[in-house]
Image (cartoon, helix red, strand yellow):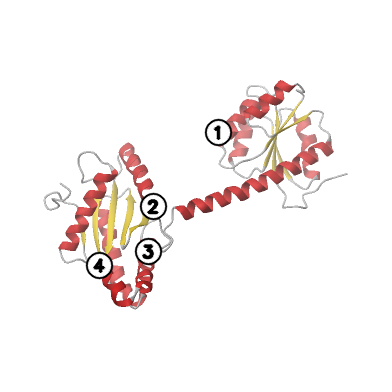
Amino acid sequence: MQLTSANGPPAHILIIDDEPTVATHIRRIVESCGHRASACHTWTEALRAFGRGDVDLILMDAVMPAVDGFKLTRIIRSRARTYVPIVFLTGLADDNARVKGIEAGGDDFLTKPIHPLELQVRIKAMLRIRSLTQALEEKTRTLSRLAAMDALTGIGNRRSFDERLRSELQISAESGKPLTVLLLDLDHFKSVNDNHGHAVGDELLRAFGRLLAESTRACDVPYRYGGEEFAVLCPNSTTDDACSLGERVRAAFQRTSGAATAAGTRTCSIGAAGTDILTGELSPHAILTAADAALYRAKDSGRNCVCKFDPMFDEKAA
C-alpha cells in the first residue's frame, strides 16, 4: 500500500542524516509519495537549507556528530518564522530518547530501520499539521493587520502608531539616524460634516488617507492619529526633509481634494518635529508635544501651511 500527496500539492521535505545511504533510502520513500526531498549530511548544511524558508517537514536523524539532532532541533526552532513539524528518525528506542526529542521540539519519532509505510503515514499526518498551522498563522497575521489598521482609511491606527513610534525612537537613538514626526490636520473639517454630512466627511478622510499612502516613501508610515488628524513617521529623515514631504502632501491635497468629494477644495495644516532639532530626553511624549506645537502654529498662522518646531516660537512645547 502506498500513500500519495493527493490531498494537496507536493511538499518540500528536508532529510537530515549524516549517513548518505540512509538519507538516500528515506529520500526514495518521500519521493514515492509525490513530494520533493532534499538531503543534508551536516548541521551547517541543514541550517542553510532550512533558512531558505520553503521547508514543510523535517525528517531528523537524532544521532549525528558535532551537533546532534536534539540540539539542531532547538536551533531550528529558535530561528523558525513558521511552524515546521520535525520527525526524529533514530536507532535510539528507549523512552529517555523520546522524551528528550519532544522536549527539544520534535513532533514524532520513528525507529530505524524505517518501514516505508510507517514513514508514509507519518509524513501524511505531519503535513496535515503543517497545513492546519499555516492556515492558523495566516489568520493570525490577518487579525493582527486588522487590529493595527484604521477601518475607515485603511492606514495605520493610533495604537499601531504609538507602538511604532516607541520602536523607531529606540532605533534612532541607537543608530544616530534622525526620526521626524509629521502631524497633519484637515482644516475646518467640522464644517464639512455640518454642511455636507458625515458620509462626505468620511469620504474626505478616506481620500486623505489614500493621498498619504501614495505620497510617502516606502520607509515612511502614515497613520490616522484621531478624528481629522493624521500622522506620518519619517525614519532617516531630518525635520527639513520631512517638511518637504509635508509640503508635497499639502499642495497635492489642495490640488486634488476638489474632485474627491462634494465638499470641494480643502486644505490641511502640518507640524513637524524631528530628533535632529530636539534637545533633552527624546521620548514619544516629547516629540509628539513638539510636533503638536508646530501644528498649532501652522493653524494660528492662517492654516494651509507647514511649520517645523521652533522653541523660539512654540512656547506650548518649551
Specify the quadrant of the image occupied by residue 89.
top right
Task: Give the mark nearest the N terminus, 4 or 1.
Answer: 1
Residue 9 vertical placement versus 19 (above, below) = below
Mark 3 — residue? 209
Disc 3 crowd rating (10 Å Cα; few below 14, some 14-19, many 20+) is many
Task: Give the mark nearest the N terminus, 1 or 2.
Answer: 1
Q: Is residue 93 visible?
A: yes
Helix, strand or loop at label 1? It is helix
Task: Give the mark nearest the N terminus, 2 or 3.
Answer: 3
Mark 1 — residue? 78
Q: CA distance from mark 1 to mark 3?
A: 38 Å
Q: Nearer the viewer, residue 239 or 19?
A: 239
Nearest-to-viewer mark from 4 and 2: 4
Task: Give the mark nearest the N terminus, 4 or 3.
Answer: 4
Nearest-to-viewer mark from 4 and 1: 4
Image check: 22 left or right of 154?
right
Mark 4 — residue? 187
Q: Amino acid at mark 1?
A: Ser
Disc 4 crowd rating (10 Å Cα; few below 14, some 14-19, many 20+) is some
Q: Amino acid at mark 2?
A: Cys
| Residue drawn at the location 55% of the way across and 33% of the way down | 78
Mark 2 — residue? 219
Specify the quadrant of the image occupied by residue 242.
bottom left
Residue 41 vertical placement versus 51 (above, below) = above
Helix, strand or loop at label 4? It is loop
Q: Is residue 264 visible?
A: no
Q: Are marks 1 and 3 in contact (CB under 8 Å)?
A: no
